[in-house]
Image (spheres, helix red, strand yellow):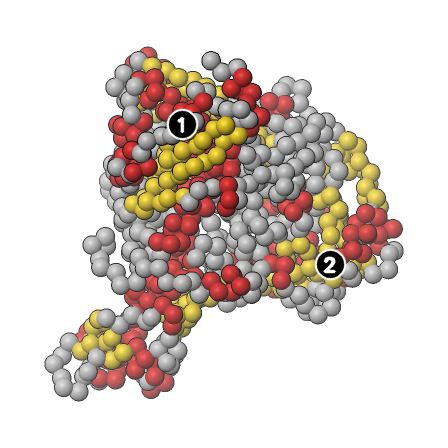
Amino acid sequence: MATVHFSSDLAAFTAGLQEVTVAAPRVQELKRSLVRRFPALEGRLDLLAVAIDGDIYNEADYRSLRDDSEVHFVPRTVGG
Amino acid sequence: MSDRVFTQIGTRPIRHDGVDKVTGRANYGADFSLPGMIHGVVVRSPHAHARIVSIDTSAAEAMPGVKAVITGRDIPPTSAKLAIGEGAFDLHDMGDNLLAHDKALYHGHAVAAVAATSLDLAREAAAAVIVRYEVLEPVDGIERAIATDAPILHADLVTTGLPPGEPAGPTNIAGRMELRRGDVEQGFREADLVVEREFRTPTVHQGYIEPHACVARYGPDGQVLVWCTTQGPFIVRDACAAILGIDGSKIKVIPSEIGGGFGGKIMLYLEPIAIRLSQKSGRPVKMVMTRDEVFRATGPTSAAIVRMKLGARRDGTLVAAQASLWYEAGAYRGSPSGAGAMCCLACYNIPNFFVEAYDVVVNKPKVAAYRAPGSPMATFATESLVDELARMLGIDPIEMRLKNAVKEGDRAPYGPTHGPIGLRQVLEAAQTHPHWTAPIGPNRGRGLACGFWFNAGMSSSATITLSNDGSAAVLTGNPDIGGTRVAQAMMVAEELGIPVDRIRPTVADTDTAGYTDLTGGSRVCYATGMAVVDAARDVRDQLRQRAAMIWNTDVAQVAWDGGRAVSLEESADRQPLTIGEIAAKAGHTGGPIVGRASVNPPMAGPAFALHICDIELDKATGRSSVVRYTAIQDVGKAVHPAYVEGQMQGGAAQGIGWALNEEYMFDRRGVMQNAGFLDYRMPVASDLPMIDTVIVEVANPLHPYGVRGVGEVPIVPPLAAVANAMRSVSGVRFTELPLSPPRVLQALGRSD
């Protein structure tokens, strides 16, 4: 199962949990699973980039996850 | 990847657009004209904060030669969003920034626009537009903005990012975010030494030489042509479509050459206005900002207040950090405070930290991206305090940084685990550099600082067409700011074996190029380059197939070696085929050969830099000069080292200007007092020494050649590198920029 790490910002919407494990083949299913478990996350995850095993994607809904994947949701950045 | 022997990558051919640019033949935003074209001028608010009571355009409209007058009523409000820069830009705000609807939110805010048959007439007509204002108190900075009795800029503004249940508005604090790790209080208890200071940096502008400029033509058939200087032609197309309610398929954007952007030419200031004026007048409309307008009405970067506390053990190990970042957003939400929070501790592996960042609206121009947006101001605080800790602990500042430097496998402050990164290699290169070990002369001081930036990925496309003579054209959608045309040609040359000067790289318009995100975020050589490499490999595969047809064999029997198709089967009549030979027979083997690729890779691999600065201080006047400067940076792989060095030098020069001279000066009414290059003092070539560069190459595994983003991180270290050098020579720890002679002199007067 993928391990999802929540920033302290997001942990405010996960009852303080900073790490959960989720069985999901792709990021889209992982997000849906998280929102089912933590309804307060609804609408928040889609605004964030997703880091999968260290690589940060702005758009990653259909990217596959490994059983041991590490997932972070991070603010989107681009630059100047 | 890193072991690959390159034939083209790493060489220094002359850029294809070089002669045009150095001879003045290149066409920039203001160089375009169309038959029947008229001129547009913007009417700007004389007040920094005012309610618009009424706008009377009748006198202007009655003037002979005036063809159109528009106001905010001609830009309908939209709730659409467009993902650019640091998050999704609110097109409602962009529309209101283009032409104010109810309130003028900064001095210079556009409130109307006029188009007339000559520029002089348009200016005369603009002066004839009568706007009645109810003048309001301007919110001139963060402290005033967050005061309990502060005027509220936007009645509907609420603070995003607050924990559930906390009151969100009305407020001038547009957003909050935080990062946390470990136990901060316990971390500080474990520290042998704690330093804490408040740092301030001013509003500064990117200072691109070319002003914003465009020509727009709204045809009788509803087809729209926009020629403009921009970092993102597709952003211009999509934003104009959304803001004006025009089908995007009707808009074609042709990017001109671009005379500097640095993030400031991502937002739109003129194009939708010019389109609307053209629609209303039936004539093409040209608009070119004056330098005064560029300063007053386009996005600078945030002024910031950063309160930071660092704790270290006696051996130099950083054990705790706490920071509070307050960034001005200007008139609408959206400062890079979040990026500042993510960057400010990114060079170090600190087990316990808490960082909070606030985005605050004030009555100043809406900020825009500026090279590593958000990172320089916060890093100024971190690197100043690390310098202070090293001094107090008696530890060499590079050793102190090496002791704490992030490395592969460490977790970034914003969460993910780093892959291969090069901060340690950069620090080691600094340790052995002759600049670091050279003696320091009288009245001179030396400082150093590190910096971090993420580097973007995002979407890019590339098309390569092969001519019958074996030459090629490579076509992408990124305006070339830093030498990306030649870099792309070099990538095609590397993959196919065609000489670089037989490859024509073209920056295409939005009808011609595949969708490509902006030129920004240090992403073009990485992401668009990746698309170019993939497209070249597509061409190469097709060339192998064509050779197989010519030889009447299976493609598996054809290899590509040294720019030629080579048969893997022994045969006397199968001499290697050159690209020219295969291309000449393309008609016989299936028609023209066109390669294409589209990519949306992850972010481009973190970049780390270290700068060493020597300054000489005249203690009688407070004037300081940079006398030696060295920029060291991990670039992954330098495709064209000369342009990589140029990026490093350019970023350093801008950062030095930020440190020493540059600042917006406002009066009590919120009116900028130095809106010109004579009074807004940027460093010019004669102000600076040759900036030495050291390219460190720790390959980025995400790119086929190991490329990382290059252009942003070099602006991050200079603020603290200069301030640390000033500390060395003056004995004063400066916490507010710029280090202008009056500020330095004043500090020296009360220095202990």
Q: Residue at x 40, y 24 (%)?
A: B728
The vertical placement of B171 against B55, above or below, is above
Residue B442 shown left or right of residue B299 in the figure: left
The three-letter amino acid code for the residue at tag 1 is Pro
Q: Residue B224's spot in the image, x, y percent? A: 64, 64
Packing grade of label 2 (10 A; few <14, some 14-19, many >=20) is many
Disc 1 on helix, strand or loop?
loop
Q: Residue A26's spot in the image, x, y percent? A: 33, 47
Q: Which residue is mark 1?
A: B442
**Looking at the image, can residue B213 be seen?**
yes
Q: Residue B363's spot in the image, x, y percent? A: 66, 33
Location of residue A4 by image quarter: top left
Q: Nearer the viewer, mark 2 or mark 1?
A: 1
The three-letter amino acid code for the residue at tag 2 is His
Q: Nearer the viewer, residue B350 or A41?
A: B350
Q: Residue at x 34, y 62 (%)?
A: B491
The image's mark for residue B39 is 2
Q: Residue B355's spot in the image, x, y percent? A: 42, 25
